[in-house]
Image (cartoon, grey):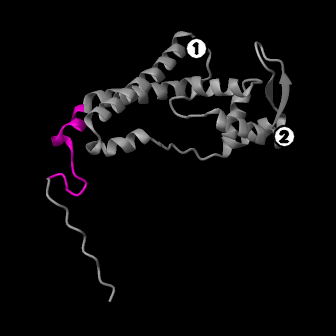
């Protein structure tokens, strides 16, 4: 989270709220960030002198902290970009639930699938807003790549759910984990004796 906050601040000074909106508009299809992780990260970055914070009056309410990237913070972020071995991990409670779809009541299963499709449509809506606003032409190539990747993944996920959801709901579509593709019970592999 700290590196992503540093990255957000490369675009200019921002409040914690601004950084959250940055994540929501740019990374919501691939990374979730809430105030519960943003503010502790900003506090730690401030302690490490990678960002500075100053209090500014709020537009229509209480004062706010405005965070600014320091030269050391910029160097730390650029070092992170050069040295990080990127990983692509998918953590999905939705997919865990779908693995056990055969145990869910049909109404609950339908609701989960509909909720996931609605979330996908919301993510695609945000991406289309970015494209329609003309921001895509002004965006850096990396930002366009991330939006395009998100659009491709979200579109494919929505298509897959719509095409295959009925298989989840039919007993014939369920395959018992203890049976192989032909429907016969698997035999346990023999255990070798170490005598």
Magenta stretch: includes residue 104 = no
Image mark for residue 49: 2
Can you identify the residue that label 1 sits on? Answer: 137
Q: Is residue 73 left or right of residue 184?
A: right
Q: Is residue 78 visible?
A: no
Depth order, front residue of 195/164? 164
**Viewer-nearest of discs 2 and 1:** 2
Q: Residues within 10 Å of mark 1 (few under 14, many from 20)?
A: few
Depth order, front residue of 147/17? 17
Provide the residue span drawn in magenta: 166-182
Q: Is residue 124 above or below residue 100?
A: above
Q: How many marks?
A: 2
Q: Is residue 182 above or below residue 44?
A: below
Residue at image coords 81%, 21% = 63
Quadrant in which residue 195 is drawn: bottom left
Q: Is residue 2 left or right of residue 159?
A: right
Q: Residues within 10 Å of mark 2 (few under 14, many from 20)?
A: some
Q: Position of residue 193 (x, y in %)?
A: 30, 83
Q: Position of residue 103 (x, y in %)?
A: 28, 45
Quadrant in which residue 26 is drawn: top right
Say which element carries label 1.
helix
Say which element carries label 2.
loop
Magenta stretch: includes residue 181 = yes
* Circle 2/circle 1 CB separation < 8 Å: no
Residue at image coords 77%, 39% = 43
Residue at image coords 42%, 30% = 153
Q: Is residue 154 visible?
A: yes
Quadrant in which residue 112 is drawn: top left
- Closer to the N terminus: mark 2 or mark 1? 2
């Amino acid at each position: 989270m700290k590196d992503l906050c540093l990255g957000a601040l490369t675009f200019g000074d921002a409040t914690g709220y601004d950084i959250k909106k940055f994540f929501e508009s740019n990374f919501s299809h691939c990374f979730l960030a809430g105030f519960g992780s943003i503010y502790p990260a900003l506090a730690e970055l401030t302690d490490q002198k990678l960002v500075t914070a100053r209090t500014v009056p709020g537009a229509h309410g209480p004062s706010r902290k405005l965070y600014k990237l320091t030269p050391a913070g910029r160097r730390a972020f650029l070092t992170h970009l050069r040295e990080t071995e990127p990983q692509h991990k998918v953590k999905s409670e939705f997919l865990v639930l779908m693995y056990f779809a055969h145990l869910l009541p049909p109404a609950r299963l339908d609701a989960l699938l509909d909720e996931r499709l609605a979330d996908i449509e919301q993510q695609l809506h945000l991406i289309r807003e970015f494209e329609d606003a003309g921001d895509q032409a002004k965006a850096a190539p990396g930002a366009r790549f991330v939006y395009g990747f998100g659009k491709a993944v979200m579109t494919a996920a929505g298509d897959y759910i719509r095409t295959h959801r009925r298989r989840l709901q039919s007993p014939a579509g369920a395959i018992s984990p203890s049976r192989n593709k032909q429907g016969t019970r698997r035999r346990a592999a023999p255990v070798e004796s170490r005598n």
